[in-house]
Structure formats: structure tokens, C-alpha cells
């Protein structure tokens, strides 16, 4: 094996093999996961690498590593905040989270106007005015040494920021998944609070999450499938305290035999029993969502054919 005829990809695989998983993964941290898997797989195919080839590839990597560090250091000397160019808006917003307003203002000052607004909108509302004030005054307060020190601290902090591919994002769908495992009354209370504090997020959540009341707004065919999978006694108990119009709609979609078996629950019933019965219905709803039998987004968009 001659080093001259080895491709760059194979050199990376050999380097991975020589250094071992622990060190190699650290050095290859900027490579996407798919390419990293391919390099690791290729590394397993090398079993007998001549020492001279190992030495040449290690030296080549080390020289390249030093050159990159030298360029980075030179760039940092000229532009201490140059590292921000490599971060996404989301990462920069996370970077300044919890930092004093003067630091957030200093970071904003390094960005082009379009990015400034994107980051500014992600800053906590209670801090925004103060950040704007600092943005206008910080040039008189911060000397070159202070700026360089702040840039150095933030750059170090940025090393530990997760990449977009390294974490699950939140949003309406994720929140809906959490709500679906909460007790119904707690989920309803949260949605009521959300409707007052963040209507836009509520709208997004409702694309994926159905409440007990929502199921009676579904197309008859869908409601029929849901109720048909639940015992008639549980349906009767779940209907306790529900408006008669809703009860009639629920009964109308049931088969005649099941309608004949229905008997309304008379007398007082504990809230826990009613909630347990409703939970059984909603459990079927969740199962049908998971299996794809119910797609809330399609239903709400009207993309259904009866």
C-alpha cells in the first residue's frame, strides 16, 4: 500500500483506524453523522496498514491541523467575533441566552441587519429594550481588550452548542405528544392557559392534538370508528354531563344494536369515573392516530372524503 494512491476518504478512514474511536470522533466532530458512519465502516476494512503509510497520513493531518489553527488564530486577531459567521441564528440566540444585555448587544453589533432582527426577536421580551439601549451606548463603554475577552469567552461557550441535527426540536407536534400522555383535565387546563398566553402555539398544537370535546366535531365515519372500539357502558359514563345534542350525535353514528344497548347513567357519578371512561375513548383516539387511521392535520384541512 502506497500513500500516494490513497484517496482522501480512505485517508480519513485510516486516520480513524489509527487514532481509535474516542480521539477520532472528537477530531471529526464537524462531519455529519452519515459521512462519519461511512468513514467508520471503511476503517473496519483496513486490517494491515504499513507503519510508513500511517506515519505519512498522521503527519499530513497534523500539518493541516496546524495550518487551520494558524488561519483561525489570524482571523480571530482581525475579527474576534468571526466565529459567529459559522453559527445559525438559533445557535446565536441560544449563545446569548442568560447573558447580560451588554453582551447580547455586543453580539448583535457584529451581525448584518437581517440577522440582527432574527436574533433580536428571539431575545426575551423583558430584555429587548435594555439590549437596544446597550447597543447604542456600548461603543463608549467597551475597550478593545474587553471586546476581545468577551469574544473569547463566547467562542469557548459556542463550542458546546448543539448542532441542529443533534437534538430533537420542540414545537406543536412535540407538545401535542406530551399532552396526549397527561391526564385529560390537566391537559385541558394547560390548553386553556395556552389559548390566553400563546394563541399561535395553540393553533399549531391543535394540528396534532384532539381533546375529548374535539372528537365530536370529527366526520361521522371517524367518530363511528372511535366509539365502536369502546364498550357501550364506557360511552354512557363518558357522556355524563355532556350536552344532549352531543349525546344524540354520538348515538346516531353507532350501529343500531349498540344504540339499543345504550342506557344513560343516572344519579351522581364521581369525576374520576367519568374521566376514566373518557380516557378509554381518548386512548383509542391516540392508537388510531399512531396507526395512521386518524390524521388530524388532514381532517382539519378538510382533506377528507366521506
Image (cartoon, rainbow, N blue to C red):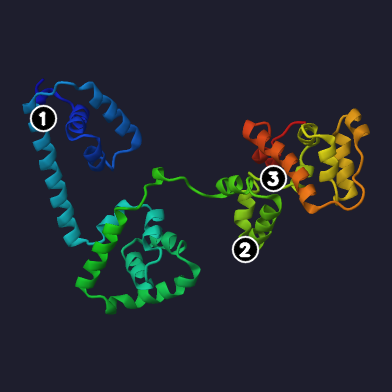
Quick check: 123 above or below 3? below
Quadrant location of the C terminus in the rendered image: top right
Query: x and y percent of residue 94 in the render?
Result: 40, 58
Rendered position, 184 above or below 133: above
**Are circles 3 and 1 on residues that touch, CB within 8 Å?**
no
- Contact? badges 2 and 3 (CB < 8 Å): no
Estimate how packed mark 1 is, as few (under 14), some (14 to 19) or many (20 or more) residues with alpha carbons within 10 Å: some
Label 2 sits on residue: 197
Q: How far separated are the C-alphas under marks 2 and 3?
A: 20 Å
Vertical relation: 203 (above or below) 106: above
Where does label 1 land, which residue? Answer: 54
Label 1 element class = helix
- Residue 196, image x, y percentages: 66, 63
Left or right: residue 107 versus residue 207 is left
Query: In this figure, which residue is indicated by the disc labeled 3?
Result: 210
Q: Nearer the viewer, residue 216 or 17?
A: 17
Q: Quadrant of the N terminus?
A: top left
Estimate the x, y position of residue 139 in percent, counting from the top left.
29, 76
In the displayed orientation, state which residue is furthest to the left.
52
Q: CA distance from mark 3 to mark 1?
A: 60 Å
Circle 2 crowding by C-alpha within 10 Å: few under 14, some 14–19, many from 20: few
Closer-to-camera residue (46/69) = 46
Would you say 289 lies left or right of 234 here? left
Q: What is the number of the mark on residue 243?
A: none
Earlier-in-chain disc, 2 versus 1: 1
User: Depth-wise, is mark 2 or mark 1 nearer the camera?
Assistant: 1
Percent position (x, y) of residue 123? 45, 64
Measuring 43% from the left and 59% from the top, which residue is drawn there?
A: 118
Amino acid at each position: 500500500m502506497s500513500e500516494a494512491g490513497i484517496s482522501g476518504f480512505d485517508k480519513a478512514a485510516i486516520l480513524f483506524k489509527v487514532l481509535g474511536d474516542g480521539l477520532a470522533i472528537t477530531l471529526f466532530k464537524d462531519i455529519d453523522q452519515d459521512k462519519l458512519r461511512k468513514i467508520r465502516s471503511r476503517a473496519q476494512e483496513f486490517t494491515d496498514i504499513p507503519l510508513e503509510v500511517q506515519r505519512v497520513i498522521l503527519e499530513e493531518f497534523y500539518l493541516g491541523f496546524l495550518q487551520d489553527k494558524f488561519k483561525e488564530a489570524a482571523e480571530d486577531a482581525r475579527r474576534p467575533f468571526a466565529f459567529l459567521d459559522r453559527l445559525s441564528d438559533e445557535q446565536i440566540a441560544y449563545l446569548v441566552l442568560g447573558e447580560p444585555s451588554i453582551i447580547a448587544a455586543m453580539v448583535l453589533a457584529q451581525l448584518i441587519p437581517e440577522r440582527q432582527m432574527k436574533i433580536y426577536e428571539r431575545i426575551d421580551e423583558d430584555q429587548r429594550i435594555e439590549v437596544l439601549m446597550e447597543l447604542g451606548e456600548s461603543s463608549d463603554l467597551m475597550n478593545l481588550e474587553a471586546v476581545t475577552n468577551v469574544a473569547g469567552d463566547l467562542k469557548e461557550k459556542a463550542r458546546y452548542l448543539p448542532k441542529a441535527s443533534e437534538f430533537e426540536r420542540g414545537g406543536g407536534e412535540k407538545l401535542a405528544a406530551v399532552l396526549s400522555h397527561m391526564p385529560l383535565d390537566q391537559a385541558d387546563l394547560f390548553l386553556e392557559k395556552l389559548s390566553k398566553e400563546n394563541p399561535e402555539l395553540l393553533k399549531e398544537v391543535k394540528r396534532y392534538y384532539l381533546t375529548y370535546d374535539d372528537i365530536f366535531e370529527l366526520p361521522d365515519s371517524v367518530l363511528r370508528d372511535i366509539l365502536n372500539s369502546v364498550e357501550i357502558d364506557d360511552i354512557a359514563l363518558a357522556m355524563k354531563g355532556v350536552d344532549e345534542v352531543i349525546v344524540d350525535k354520538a348515538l346516531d353514528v353507532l350501529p343500531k344494536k349498540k344504540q339499543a344497548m345504550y342506557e344513560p347513567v343516572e344519579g351522581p357519578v364521581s369525576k374520576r369515573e367519568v374521566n376514566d371512561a373518557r380516557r378509554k375513548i381518548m386512548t383509542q383516539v391516540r392508537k388510531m392516530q399512531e396507526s395512521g387511521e386518524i390524521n388530524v392535520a388532514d381532517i382539519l384541512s378538510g382533506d377528507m372524503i366521506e
